Image (tube, coloured by chain):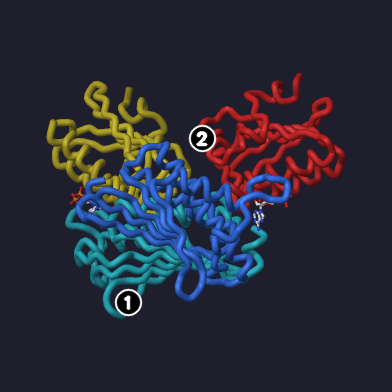
Chain colours: A yellow, B red, C cyan, D blue
Amino acid sequence: MELGLDVQKTGSHAVVDVKGEIDVYTAPKLREKLIELVSEGSYDVVVNLEGVDFLDSTGLGVLVGALKRVKAHDGSLSLVCTQDKILKIFKITGLTKVFPIHETVDAATGA
Amino acid sequence: MELGLDVQKTGSHAVVDVKGEIDVYTAPKLREKLIELVSEGSYDVVVNLEGVDFLDSTGLGVLVGALKRVKAHDGSLSLVCTQDKILKIFKITGLTKVFPIHETVDAATGA
Amino acid sequence: MQQRARSSVALVRLEIPPRSPYVGVVRLAISSLARSAGLDEEKVDDIKIAVSEACANAVLNNEEASTDAPVTISWEDSDGSVRIEVADRGATVDSSASADVDTQGFSTRAVMSFALLKSLVDDCEFQPRDGGGMTTRLLINR
Amino acid sequence: MQQRARSSVALVRLEIPPRSPYVGVVRLAISSLARSAGLDEEKVDDIKIAVSEACANAVLNNEEASTDAPVTISWEDSDGSVRIEVADRGATVDSSASADVDTQGFSTRAVMSFALLKSLVDDCEFQPRDGGGMTTRLLINR
Ligand SMILES: Nc1ncnc2c1ncn2[C@@H]1O[C@H](COP(=O)(O)OP(=O)(O)O)[C@@H](O)[C@H]1O
Ligand SMILES: Nc1ncnc2c1ncn2[C@@H]1O[C@H](COP(=O)(O)OP(=O)(O)O)[C@@H](O)[C@H]1O
């Protein structure tokens, strides 16, 4: 099981395209990538979840951890997601109130 | 796990399009369908395996059983298959010498 | 599935090393069982997440305890319901004792996992095991 | 898989009712393990067929014996090789006694199964079990 992580810098934002399943095995890879971005000075991060077909609490934990990191630098972390089964996870855990969730990458970067 | 079985009569041939996995669970469904065709008087049968992604010895057994049935009526059973992983099964078991194997349904029906 | 209907209880068991790379195979096996049992796709997805949560908790409990004892997943499909158990030999967790939120007010992973488990299946129970570890029991009504 | 490499042997076990609808889930689980273990797609396909053959044989042996004892599949991934065992409590089969061809000269299913098993893995052994049933042992070298 591989997690695809593709980063693109667009203007002031770093956009991370995630592909595959985010679970207890793969979440640490996403965590490393997000830590790396922040340590490189990318404080406005967009995580595109459109290619994600599974997400569990370890993935949510990693996203919350990244949010705390960017906030420490007055940055932002927003998500791109239109898939009902993924949105459901954010709703159940109350995270729809914590993350701005957009329908497209352009909406998330304000392009 | 569902086995798709779609029958089309083209001229003198009955063409069975099989979709899915032919294994110990699904092979009996294929067997029934082939017995039904022969009992209806279809003695020239083409089994199209292009949509099959798994085949084991129970599936082979069913094809051999059907061959015997059509031969009892001077009929024929031919296969359509271009997938290497499926052809491999026929080679290992020596059945490439038993069944005519064609690349297209048209070649199998002589159209 | 005709053959399954003949007997009223069908038991499938899966044993994995208590490590994260194996959770994916459990998810795959359970989804396939749930689909074959005739549950609809939304229910299959819910079960997939719930089982994954239970396995993730087991694997993480295990990292703390660092044993090598397997995590056992069992699937029981009786007439009216599906029962799934995930049992580990990791740390015995007292859920009432763990913090709900971190110092900044964010929910912890454990709390989010708990929320998902409670919401996605019809009943969910956690129980310490004799000899150490936890059992998570999931009930899904048809 | 880094975490798997840490320990030299990883054991996964799967127990299914001895009936045909469950063979598909074994195939899925084993393919996923084989793929995660870094085997290439052709080898994954070979293993998938071999395990399916062993399970089909177990299920068919079982129909004759009509017990309800589970079929157990184990996967052991050690450094140089993968070992898979399929054990049933069905009929004890004496492979030397079964007919190779039927009255019309066609190979029987059992013989084709045997040919596939022998050809698709590096080693394949059949052994009667104490207490009844058979064990099929498959060895795949990396
Ligand atoms: N062993 C582990 N394997 C996989 N994921 C883990 C593991 N330990 C923690 N996590 C995930 O990582 C999150 C913690 O990540 P981190 O970014 O360090 O957050 P924080 O800033 O709160 O420490 C947890 O909420 C959990 O989702
Ligand atoms: N219980 C079973 N479940 C699934 N497949 C079976 C079962 N018993 C037999 N088969 C398959 O059916 C084949 C026999 O089918 P059949 O068409 O009756 O052949 P025959 O004409 O030789 O009797 C076997 O070779 C095997 O592949």
Residue at the (59%, 57%) spot, across then down: D21
Label 2 to label 1: alpha-carbon separation:
46 Å
Q: Is residue C35 left or right of residue A51?
A: right
Residue at the (26%, 41%) spot, across then down: A30
What x and y, as percent, mark residue A105? 36, 28
Name the chain under label 2: B
Say whether mark 2 is within 8 Å of ligand 2. no
In the rendered image, which residue does mark 2 sit on? B85
* Residue furthest top as drawn: B111
Bin the neighbour count of mark 1 within 10 Å (Cα to Cα): few under 14, some 14-19, many 20 and up. some
In the rendered image, which residue does mark 1 sit on? C129
Q: Up-down: is C72 above or below B15? A: below
Nearest the viewer among A105 and D3 is D3
Q: Is residue B14 left or right of residue B64?
A: right
Nearest the viewer among B87 and A19 is B87
Under mark 2, the amino acid is Lys
Residue C112: quarter of image: bottom left
Say whether mark 1 is within 8 Å of ligand 1. no
